[in-house]
Amino acid sequence: MDNVSEKTAKNTPEIAPPEYVIEMLHITKDFPGIRANDDVSLQLKKGEIHALLGENGAGKSTLMGVLFGLYSAEKGEIRKNGKAVRIHNPNDANTLGIGMVHQHFKLVHNFTVLENIVLGVETTKGGVLRMDEARAEVTALSQQYGLMVDPDARIEDITVGMQQRVEILKMLYRHNEILIFDEPTAVLTPQEIDELMKIMKNLTSEGKSILFITHKLNEIKQVADRCTVLRKGRCVGSVEVAGATREQMSEMMVGRKVEFEIQKAPMKPGGKAALVVQNLTVRSKHHGKPRVNNVSFAVRQGEILCIAGIDGNGQSELVYALAGLLAPESGRIFLGDEEITRDSVRQRNDAGLSHIPEDRHKHGLVLDYSLAENLILKNYHKRGFQQNGFLRFDKVADYAGRLIKDFDIRSGQGMRTPARSMSGGNQQKAIVAREICEDPKVLIAVQPTRGLDVGAIEYIHRRIIAARDEGKAVLLVSLELEEVLSISDRILVIYEGEIVADLDGAGATAQELGLYMAGSRKGEAV
């Protein structure tokens, strides 16, 4: 009997493991007024980084939401290691080894790093939390994957990049094997992005499989093995990244050729100063330390002046003071010949100052208002949109409809769509549309293309350059060196709250900017 069993075993071919660790087949997902995913299929190999590329509103986050159990698809099937599975909620996904880092992190800000990591899977004994074992495991995971964080630090006290590491550790602590990253670099500095790319490669070298949602073609070329492209909810195709160019992938994404270098006419010198900042000092709203130290500069009409620097060097506090969100300790701010240092936000807006904020949720939108209501947030009190204290809804609809069309803002229920339910990129486009179409004297644009696809970035850059050519003054604050060098007429570099360089945009290089941003050449060019 043993001999028969041995002979049978020898003649039985080994069953090869399935090629794909995750398969999403013919997924269809509907929301009111829109089909977000239309018969989409995607296959993830074990140990690969698979990028998911598409325009804002193409259905990328929705598709990953179906995989993570945030949504239930109307049609389609999900397989793990070749076997069909049902995922009704994120707990089911975690049980199957699927984790997700969301674009907007899901962390409790007054909890520590360790408390956030174990939240929901706490170890207890006799009703008492046992954190010693969790601490040891988190420390070991941190060292294994190069995710060094302080387990006792509070989330509110650490950088965005560190918060992202906490989200990754949450997945690893739950022993997730399939890791979903939804726009993971949208809020990171260039240095943090480089660190994340290394971390992702480390994860796959340890056998993890990654689905990576992004708009950034350079990042796909840097780390991804394959890329699946979605356009308007449908799958355009999948390509091997090594054999595809940025131009080919961008054309698959938007359906047309995209210009990566925007042509702009030289700045016409001699414009009057539209925004003047004199000896401005601003303290942090959190700990009272000076974040902007005696800064002076002017932005002329018909000029794009960029403030460049590594995140956290005083850019936020400078912009808050200019926009009226934070009172300066000393110094003066002028809009043309009019001093606005102590004016309210509305007074500054009415005087001709527009502001695209860095945090679209905190300072850009009222998330529970409709898209139309958000588009008139700065206009609703003006005669064109109200009469005797009552909104003129026909005028609101006409105005909102024009902006939605001009800026290609995509939403399931048109202008009635709650802002909260829109994709991050379309939320950003709504803010940009509102601020640019205010016909401002001065436009302060902070990370205006954050979270946008290449087609939308091209369009926003054209609109900013058009505003300059119409004689408006533009103050651009950006962490993206490619953006800084592409559209700036003049560049100021900020380091530790001080302006350390004043450079001509046409002659500046990334290497030169990098040295100033790191403080290596402080004081040489001012």
Image: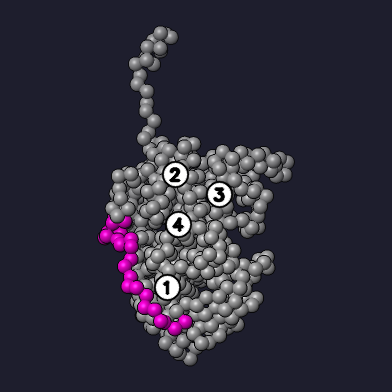
Q: Position of residue 41 (x, y in %)?
A: 33, 47
Look at mark 1 in the image and give the residue it sits on.
Answer: 304
The N terminus sits in image quarter: top left
Amino acid type of the residue tagged 4 in the rendering: Gln
- Distance of mark 2 from mark 3, alpha carbons? 15 Å
Callout 2: SS: strand
Disc 1 secondary structure class: strand
Mark 3 or mark 1: whose residue is earlier in sequence: 3
Residues rendered magenta in the picture: 250-273
Residue 406 position (above or below residue 77): below
The residue nearer to you, when weighing 299 against 288, is 299
Say which residue appears at 54% left-offset and 47% top-offset: 168
- Marks 4/3 in contact by CB < 8 Å: the verdict is no
- Residue at which label 4 appears: 511
Position above or below: 291 against 53:
below
The answer to whether the residues at label 2 and label 1 have Cβ atoms under 8 Å apart is: no
Circle 3 sits in a helix, a strand or a loop, which is it? helix
Q: Which mark is residue 165?
A: 3
| Three-letter residue code for mark 2 | Ile
Label 3 crowd (10 A; few <14 / some 14-19 / many >=20): many
Residue at coordinates 65% horizontally, 76% vertically from top-left?
A: 329
Mark 2 → mark 4, Cα distance in angstroms: 32 Å
> Which residue appears at 51% of the width and 61% of the height?
516
